[in-house]
Amino acid sequence: MSYKNFPMVPRVVFGRGSFNQLNEILAPKRLSVNAPFIFLVDDVFKNNTELTSRISLYYDDKIIFISTKEEPKTTQVDELVEEIILNTKERPSGIIGIGGGSILDLAKAVSIMLSNEGEAKDYQGWDLVKNPAIYHVGIPTISGTGAEVSRTTVLTGPEKKLGINSDFTPFDQVILDSELTKGVPKDQWFYTGMDCYIHCIESLNGSYLNSFSQSYGEKSLDLCKEIFLGDFADLSDVEAQEKLMMASWHGGMSIAYSQVGVAHAMSYGLSYLLGTKHGLGNCVVFDHLEEFYPEGVALFKEMKIKHNIELPQSICAQLSNDEFDIMIDVALSLEPLWENAIGKNWQKTITREKLKGLYQKM
Ligand code: NAD
Ligand code: ZN
């Protein structure tokens, strides 16, 4: 048995208003006047001067606003890398991602592809990256995915939706400033927050569980219960925002040393075929998984009611058999997730018919 030697984010700032320290954190990392910092920012902040005015641009530094209507694609990474190479005199000093899971993943992938040959799709998988990424910083503006701590960057490629999992993927620096999350709309707050909750349930109920994962997973789960079932007046509560930020972090740490499970496997199928976004897709699937996670799903339903969340219904109602087959293929290809969720003999119970029956309910 060989144990994972897992890289962690080496530097993190936590605190309300800590985003103000960004310029001072970056300054010593500048390699030359010709090597700019490139800021990849969710375009929801395009006209938000409260955020953008605090990013100081020097020399050739540049902000690129990015739409997150769709989840990141390998081709989008390749285009960004090309745009950056064509418009900079030297390889950039660093990439700074400011946004949710989508932007954080793009920032990680772009920083890897600026120092590795070929196309992003060539690196989807485990430990395929050869050279260290350039310096990259992650600044979440919505909490839940754990992308700020994880060793992966999830991308949709021409053939698969799969992460670039490597020791070079984690950020060199993270800034956790909960104030940046204050404008998140309620539905999205719930969906992305539930991504974190589901990470905990899947990790804590999986066969890969160990004390490392458990210690992070339990803490994160406690925080989720406090946030989503406790008596905070609403999501503008500062303490609730800070707690969700830490829940996301711990949830990410928990799965780093274990794995996710049934909801994630099936949600990847929805996302691949229908483009359903990760947080929402997880909720749609998890709502029907009481046979796998009875307690977790019961609590989820309570949270849904407490926050008046109505999930879309019958999104699979009109699908053809071929379309079900595509989703089932994607879900079944994620073998470690099933092995974690069900155990070594998962193939005995997780049949194509079983998955089709579940998808038909969604
Ligand atoms: P997201 O990044 O797509 O953002 C969701 C929505 O929230 C967007 O419309 C965005 O504009 C908006 N938003 C973000 N911050 C805001 C703010 N402060 N104010 C107002 N609106 C704001 O969603 P997400 O759920 O954070 O991330 C999902 C992505 O993360 C998926 O692509 C998924 O594959 C990926 N993911 C990655 C990992 C990982 O470990 N790398 C883990 C889980 C999920
Ligand atoms: Zn997730």
Image: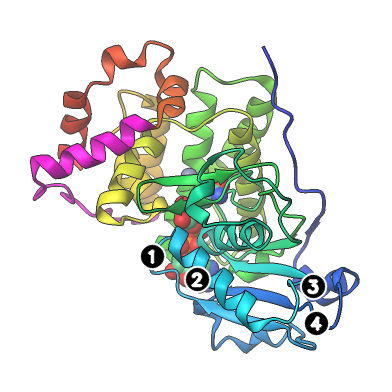
**Mark 4 sits on what residue?**
34
Q: Quadrant of residue 289?
A: top left
Question: Are discs 2 and 3 less than 8 Å apart at CB?
Answer: no
**15 lies left or right of 281:** right
**Mark 1 sits on what residue?**
70
**Mark 3 sits on what residue?**
22
Q: Which residues are magenta?
A: 307-333
Q: Quadrant of residue 180?
A: bottom right
Tag 1: amino acid: Glu
Q: Earlier in the sequence, mark 2 or mark 1?
A: 1
**Quadrant housing the N terminus:** top right
Q: Earlier in the sequence, mark 1 or mark 3?
A: 3
**Quadrant housing the C terminus:** top left
Q: Residue at x 78, y 71 (%)?
A: 93
Mark 4–mark 2 Cα distance, whole angstroms, equals 21 Å
In this view, the residue in front, 33 or 357, is 33
Q: In front: mark 2 or mark 3?
A: 2
